[in-house]
Amino acid sequence: MEGMLHGVPFLCWPYFADQFANQSYVCNVWGTGIKLCRDERGVVTKEEIESKVVRLLGDQGVKARAATWKDKACASIAEGGSSHQCLLKLVNLLGEVGSHPITV
């Protein structure tokens, strides 16, 4: 999310757990990154990394989508944005729970 907030294009090399879902969103849904692929031995070669870095840095579409998502993320966390509003709701709910004893 930090990379998205700063408009950074991603070079994705998932290894474990949620990284595969993150890579799918970055590359397939948001279009702000490129996935590294393993060869027939299961190795990501230096040539693969080099070619994808060159492609990523030269792809104006990826850069433009990253900038668009940056703007959306910044608007969301700004005062009045959707994430800001949700955080305020959570804080208010926690305040309500804290002022009433919980009975079991």
Image (tube, grey):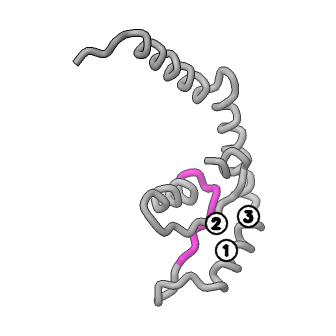
Label 2 sits on residue? 11
Which residue appears farthest toward the bottom when viewing the image? 41
Which image quarter: residue 52? bottom right
Circle 3 residues within 10 Å: few <14, some 14–19, many ≥20: some
Q: Position of residue 95 (x, y in %)?
A: 48, 15
**Residue at left 54%, top 77%?**
37
Q: Earlier in the sequence, mark 3 or mark 1?
A: 1
Along the line of sight, which residue is nearer the eye, 61 or 91?
91
Q: CA distance from mark 1 to mark 2?
A: 7 Å
Q: Position of residue 68 (x, y in %)?
A: 70, 44
Could you say whether the residue bearing mark 2 is in a helix, strand or loop? strand
Does residue 20 lie above or below 51 as drawn? above
Label 2 packing within 10 angstroms: few (<14), some (14-19), many (20+): some
The part of the chain drawn in magenta is 29-37
Q: Amino acid at mark 3?
A: Asp
Assess disc 1: are there few (<14), some (14-19) or many (≥20) residues with their C-alpha within 10 Å of its C-alpha. Answer: some
Picture coordinates of residue 53 (x, y %)?
71, 72
2 left or right of 54 in image: left
Q: CB atoms at circles 1 and 2 under 8 Å apart?
A: yes
Mark 3–mark 2 Cα distance, whole angstroms, equals: 12 Å
